[in-house]
Image (cartoon, rainbow, N blue to C red):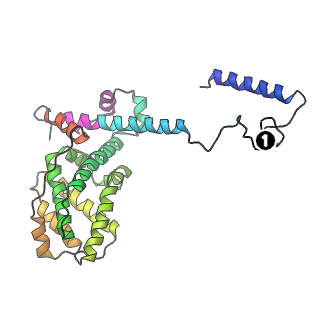
Amino acid sequence: MTDLRMEAGACDGAERDRGEAGPSSAIGSGHPNAIGSEAGKPDHRKPDHRKPDHRKAVAAARRQRMERRLVEAAIFVVAARGSEALSIDDIISEAGVARGTFYKYFVNVDQVLLEAKGMLGGEIMQLVLDSTPPVEDPAETMAHFILSFFATFRRYPLMGEFVACTGLAALDDPATLTAAEQFFDALEALLALGRAADRFIDMPPGIAFDFMRVGVVMSLRRSLAGHPPDDAETTAALLRLYGVPAQDAARLGNLEGRSLEAPQGGLIERSEKIRWSRPVGLGL
């Protein structure tokens, strides 16, 4: 809606400009002889487009906060009740917003779940990246990384519900890829170290990244479906794909993965508290 006060101010300014120029003046403000545009003096009546638009920055920050609010609401609902019957009404009720607000940011529940998976996955990835012990052998570092992810995932199984309900299609979603950017960079650096040490074969990082994502996600989905955990076998198989000899890969796959602790106040820790308070019979 147009601000009438702004319009009035603009009109007053225009009247003042016309008065200063004189009734017979037809010189525009862009003309070198225009009032307020004398040589060496800026025309203060014109906006300075070189300055950043503060309103756009504020609007972008507001949008980011609301998106996160809706995603966190979905996570907390799933933590409390499970993912089977998650609805838009559940999300907007938890977030305390109107239905129209939801549709300004998301198309449907599936899109929110993908964002939630990326957000939770990003926290777990950051935990593992920050805690992976630096060892001399790049292949052993890789094994520690994979096994620690499995162990941490099982300590905080809410992530499993998002893997189960979003599936492998989420691997190509921008939200999930954004959450994995740091992991991709770390993997690329580790592969380079491994090639230099003659531990890994020469492989494009994108392919290595895809092998890792699909192998880990499918292992987690098998576990969620009730099959025995195959962390060691999956880790060994990935190492073999990267060029580690089979016997050595099997040894590294049987190393013990560290179960890492989520930081206090983080999204994982807060949602897990809600999950533990679930009534019996509502899933994980």
Q: Image height check: is 170 above or below 235?
A: above
Give the residues in magenta: 74-96
Please state, as top left, top right, bottom left or bottom right, where the N terminus lies in the image. Answer: top right
- From where the camera sits, is residue 54 visible? yes
Q: Is 110 part of what is drawn in magenta?
A: no
Q: What residue type is labelled 1?
A: Gly
Q: Quadrant of residue 37?
A: top right
Q: What element carries label 1?
A: loop
Q: Image height check: is 71 above or below 240?
A: above
Q: Is the magenta stretch mostly helix, strand or loop?
A: helix
Please provide percent x and percent y for residue 63: 44, 37
Depth order, front residue of 142/38:
38
Depth order, front residue of 218/96:
96
Q: Image height check: is 234 above or below 64?
A: below
Q: Is 86 part of what is drawn in magenta?
A: yes
Furthest toward the front, the residue is 40
Kindly identify which residue carries mark 1: 30
Furthest toward the right, the residue is 24
Report whether 244 appears left or right of 210.
left
Please provide percent x and percent y for residue 4: 64, 21
Please name the residue shown 33% across and 61% down the image. 185
Please provide percent x and percent y for residue 199: 22, 75
Report whether 259 appears left or right of 216.
left
